Image (cartoon, helix red, strand yellow):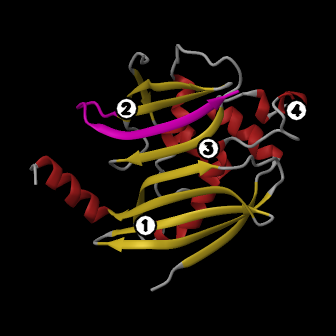
Amino acid sequence: MKTEKTLVTITEEMVLNYEVIFGKQNKLPPTFPMIFYRYINVPWDYKTAPIHRKQTCVCHSELSIGESYHCVVTLDQVKQKGKYMFYTQSLVGYNLEGSECFRCVSELVVH
Amino acid sequence: MCVRISRTLTITEEKIKQYAFLSGDFNQIHLDQKEAERYKFKEPIAHGMLTMGLTLEIASSFTEKGMRISTYEMQFIKPIFQNDLIYIVAKKKKQDYGSIYLEITGRKQNELVVRGELALERLSSIHFNNATKESGM
C-alpha cells in the first residue's frame, strides 16, 4: 500500500521553524524530510497510538531551500506478534528528474 | 585516533509542543498526561524524531568543517519523558576515504535509552560516489 505522490518544496519558513527547535543548521540533516509527513495524506490508520521503535534516514544528495521533491509513503510491512502490531513504512523523496534523493524508514509498534 | 564527543540535552515540554506543530504529529501520548498514562507511560513521551534531531548537534563539529550527514539510524530503546536529561556520547566507529562513521548512545541516569549510527561524508566523496553510480562503476 502506498500514498499518492505529493510534491513538497523546502521553503525558508520551513527551515526557520525547524531551526527554532534544533538550532542553526549548516546543512539540512537526513531527518529533515520527516516533517514532510504533515503534507502527505497517509490512507492507512493505526488502531491506537503508534510508538516509534527505530528510524533510518538516508540522504543521497544535499537538501536545500527551493528544492522540490515528489514524496511517496509506502507501508512496507505489517506484522502481528501477540497483542502488538509492528509497522514498517518508508517516506521516499524523488527529485523532478525522478532520482531518489532521500529515504526515511520508520518502524512503529502499536499496542 | 580515538574521537569521543559528549553532550547533555533536555527535551522540554516546550520543545515537544513545538515539534508537534512543526511535524503535525499531535499524537496525544506526546502531549497529554492522561493519554500517556493510558499507554502505561508515567508522563507524555518525546517524539522519536525530536530526540533524533536534537542528538544531531553532537555532529556539529564535523558539519561545521563541511561534512554532510548522509545516514542516520536510531533505535528508541526506552521512552524519554519531558524534562529528562539525556547524556549523549558519539564515538568514532570507523573512517573510510572521505567518510566517518559515529556510534551514538543516549543514557538517562545510566540507562541506555537510544542507540544509533551516523555516517558523515565529505561533499567531494558524495559527488564521487554519485559519479561512480551513474557511470556504473
In the rendered structure, which disc, 3 or 4, sits on the residue that comes first in sequence?
Answer: 4
B63 displayed left or right of A48: left
Relative height, residue B107 to residue A100 (above, below): below
Give, as a three-letter code, the residue at label 1: Tyr
Q: Report the chain holding disc 4.
A: B
Question: In which chain is the residue bearing label 3?
Answer: B
Image quarter in which the C terminus of chain A is found: top right
Q: Earlier in the sequence, mark 1 or mark 3?
A: 3
Q: Tags 1 and 3 in contact by the CB under 8 Å rule?
A: no
Label 3, secondary structure: give it: helix
Find residue B22 and report its horizontal and vertical position in percent. 64, 35
Q: CA distance from mark 1 to mark 4?
A: 38 Å
User: In the image shown, does A105 or A3 lie closer to the viewer?
Assistant: A105
- Quadrant in the picture for residue B57: bottom right
Q: Residue at x 22, y 57 (%)?
A: B129
* Disc 1: host chain: B
Q: Main secondary structure of the magenta part?
A: strand
Which mark is on residue A69? 2
For label 4, the residue is: B37
